[in-house]
Image (cartoon, rainbow, N blue to C red):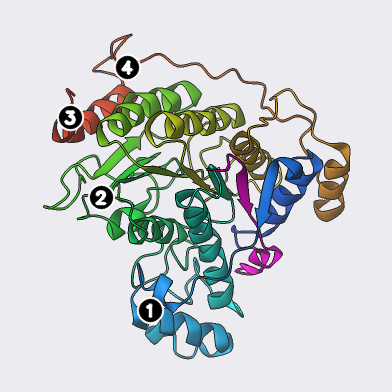
Amino acid sequence: MSGRAQLMWDERVTGYDFGPGHPMDPMRLSLTRELVRAFGLDPALRVVAAPPAGESTLALVHDADYVAAVRRASAEPAAVPVSYEAYASYGLGTDDNPVFPRMHETAALIAGQSVGAAEAVWGGEAAHAVNFAGGLHHAMPGSAAGFCVYNDAALAVARLLELGAERVAYVDVDVHHGDGVQTAFWDDPRVLTISLHEHPRTLFPQTGWPEETGGPAAEGGAVNVALPAGTGDAGWLRAFHAVVPELLAAFGPQVLVSQHGADTHIEDPLAHLAVSLDAQRAVAEACHALAHEHAGGRWVALGGGGYAVTDVVPRTWTHLVAIAAGVPVAPESPVPEEWRHQVYARTRHPAPLRMTDGCEPRWTGFEEAGYDPADRLDQAILATRRAVFPLHGLLP
């Protein structure tokens, strides 16, 4: 293993653009890339552009007729409204997933970066690999969903299995349930999927209940922590540390794939958690440490949701890249002036001044400090532990 981190980047991923007014603004990708450059992180990275995922790779997760439908819609986007019913069954042409030119090519390119990251880490070309354009975890085998066309996260896991991995752990801290990845590996005992997300009663996709624990051949292979709306730093970190480390220790993954959607942030317009940039950074650091502790250091880190396009997403994912590169950015660091000028020029809004929200994330351990059976957060944690821990030989 070279020890050097790999950043997957191809400028063309910014073509993943659902159009004006859509929350999935590709500017969040280009601004993140520019902030990584502004912090001088490139010398600590191997920056690589992988080829798009081809038909055989997409077929590891997606149905052939769905891929064909995406191709057709991409080639003739103007025809989609006319044939709406035919495309709607594939989740295309909807408000969430409007069709845009070259949609297939761009989505396959993003998927290719995550697959390339998995190949580099498994093959020892890199200790860690990051694709912050990825993490499109809602796409199902036969349909688009939730701004996601191809499920690059599931494809990365599937490629690891194809290469010979026997145990892959997937940890998803996006505010939305990682439903597409869970579906792809629901009955596969080689994969452990863990998702921490806002409770399905209050947020899309209305799945991810603690009782969802995997299929008959993989009981305990799906883990869901459904957090109450309004959960902040202390509760979010408490839940993460009360569930993830013990399960990874019991499962013993050979690779850790993590999804770092930034939409848990208090400023995100599409959800209802109250997490800070500083807590998001703390979870990225925790995933890094857990990869070294339980997966031989093999870590594939992906982006995901996040719709506070200038204030939150670029800073969160720059922290993620820096942690993977082994040169973490101190939270108190000022945001480079040239990047702030670029943000103002593109948006006419001021950029944040520092790489912190000014918070000091702290939490109390679930087992060490005890739990409150009347507390909604502790109820959520305990529901997950009761549903899953015994299936791994652990006490709830």
What percent of the width, then of the height, locates residue 244? 35, 31
Please give the label number shown on residue 386.
3
Q: Tell me where the magenta segment starts and ends, as one range.
A: 1-21
Q: Which residue is mark 4?
A: 366
At x 35%, y 80%, the residue is: 64
At x 71%, y 63%, the residue is: 11
What percent of the width, then of the height, locates residue 273? 48, 35
Mark 4 residue type: Phe
Mark 3 residue type: Arg
Query: Mark 2 to mark 3: distance in Å?
Result: 22 Å
Residue 99 appears in the picture as rendered: no
Query: Would you say 79 lies left or right of 395 here?
Result: right
Could you tell which of marks 3 and 1 lies nearer the N-terminus?
1
Mark 2 residue type: Arg
Residue 179 appears in the picture as rendered: yes
Work out whether 179 lies above or below 101: above
Q: Foreground residue, 359 or 5?
A: 5
Q: Which residue is mark 1?
A: 66
Displayed quadrant of residue 194: top left
Q: Which residue is mark 2?
A: 190
Q: Residues within 10 Å of mark 2 (few under 14, many from 20)?
A: some
Q: Secondary structure at mark 4?
A: loop
